């Protein structure tokens, strides 16, 4: 009889322990599912502003409709305006971009900067960060292209960093602008982050001038607190 009671007690302990184990495992599984769901929510990319997406597409269509000759004509007018701009004339350390065929051509400006003995800096995109690196002799001819077709210094090239040594003027690209200086970029946030950084860290912040085709000017832009304005927009008309 005592053996029978002892057996039942052991069986009850075993069943109880099994039930507790099942409960614990269930909690662990649920907790892992909740954790994974939370991580996925935190890691999910920010949804782009539909108004910005639409406007980027609209401006891209406008630029695509321009002939090669018209792009050259407007680029020449912008070039003439830039080299006669007082901010440009007084600047010796100038950051600008390596243009594609969908942007105002900056190569004549790069040549002009070098010809007058000033320093030109251009963007390098790497690891989600944009740096402005100094152009040295021959750099333009040997630069690799990014997946977006933008020429930039390779990762192993050592060049002076404009953020560390200071800039006088930044000539910025963009998708769309207002005459009041609002700017819509390509969506990566590189220039907004860079301008916010240099404006807060450099003792005397550089002036920022945007250059654009006339079709890139709009009456208003969808903006938020992270969007950096430019000091002036220079365009053909």
Image (tube, rainbow, N blue to C red):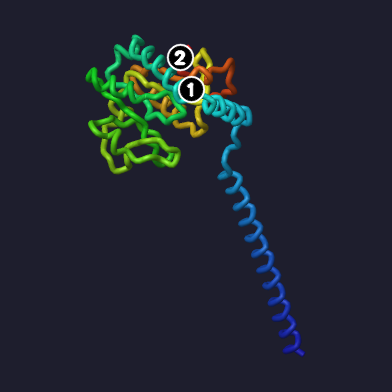
The residue under label 2 is 236
Which label sits on residue 168?
Answer: none
Q: Residue at x 45, y 18 (%)?
A: 230
| Vertical placement of residue 101 versus 84, above or below | below
Q: Residue 101 location, x and y as percent?
A: 44, 30
Q: Are marks 1 and 2 in contact (CB under 8 Å)?
A: no
Mark 1 nearby-residue class (10 Å; few <14, some 14–19, many ≥20):
many
Closer-to-camera residue (127/31): 127
Residue 78 visible (yes or no):
yes
Name the quadrant containing residue 65: top right
Q: Residue 79 location, x and y as percent?
A: 37, 17
Closer-to-camera residue (69/59): 69
Task: Choose the circle earlier in sequence order: 1 or 2.
Answer: 1
Closer-to-camera residue (117/24): 117
Residue 210 visible (yes or no):
no
The alpha-carbon separation of the residues under discs 1 and 2 comes to 23 Å
Q: Residue 1 location, x and y as percent?
A: 77, 90
Q: Secondary structure at mark 2?
A: loop
Q: Secondary structure at mark 1?
A: loop
Q: Nearer the viewer, mark 1 or mark 2?
A: 2
Name the quadrant containing residue 128: top left
In the shown orientation, is residue 73 left or right of residue 60? left
Q: How many marks?
A: 2
In the shown orientation, is residue 163 left or right of residue 215? left
Q: Residue at x 34, y 12 (%)?
A: 87
Q: Residue 98 location, x and y as percent?
A: 37, 30
The residue under label 1 is 228
| Vertical placement of residue 234 versus 19, above or below | above
């Amino acid at each position: 009889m005592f053996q029978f009671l002892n057996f039942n007690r052991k069986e009850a302990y075993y069943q109880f322990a099994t039930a507790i184990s099942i409960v614990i495992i269930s909690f662990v599984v649920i907790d892992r599912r909740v954790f994974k769901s939370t991580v996925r929510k935190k890691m999910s990319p920010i949804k782009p502003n539909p108004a910005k997406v639409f406007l980027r597409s609209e401006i891209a269509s406008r630029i695509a409709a321009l002939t090669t000759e018209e792009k050259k004509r407007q680029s020449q007018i912008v070039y003439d305006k830039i080299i006669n701009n007082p901010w440009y004339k007084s600047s010796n350390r100038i950051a600008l971009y390596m243009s594609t065929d969908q942007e105002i051509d900056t190569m004549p400006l790069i040549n002009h900067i070098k010809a007058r003995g000033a320093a030109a800096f251009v963007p390098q995109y790497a690891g989600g960060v944009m740096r402005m690196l100094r152009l040295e002799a021959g750099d333009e001819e040997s630069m690799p292209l990014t997946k977006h077709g933008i020429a930039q210094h390779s990762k192993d090239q050592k060049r002076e960093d404009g953020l560390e040594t200071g800039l006088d003027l930044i000539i910025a690209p963009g998708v769309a602008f207002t005459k009041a200086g609002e700017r819509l970029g390509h969506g990566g946030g590189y220039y907004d982050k860079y301008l916010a950084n240099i404006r807060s860290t450099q003792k005397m912040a550089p002036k920022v001038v945007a250059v654009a085709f006339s079709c890139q000017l709009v009456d208003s832009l969808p903006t938020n607190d992270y969007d950096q304005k430019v000091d002036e927009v220079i365009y053909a008309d």
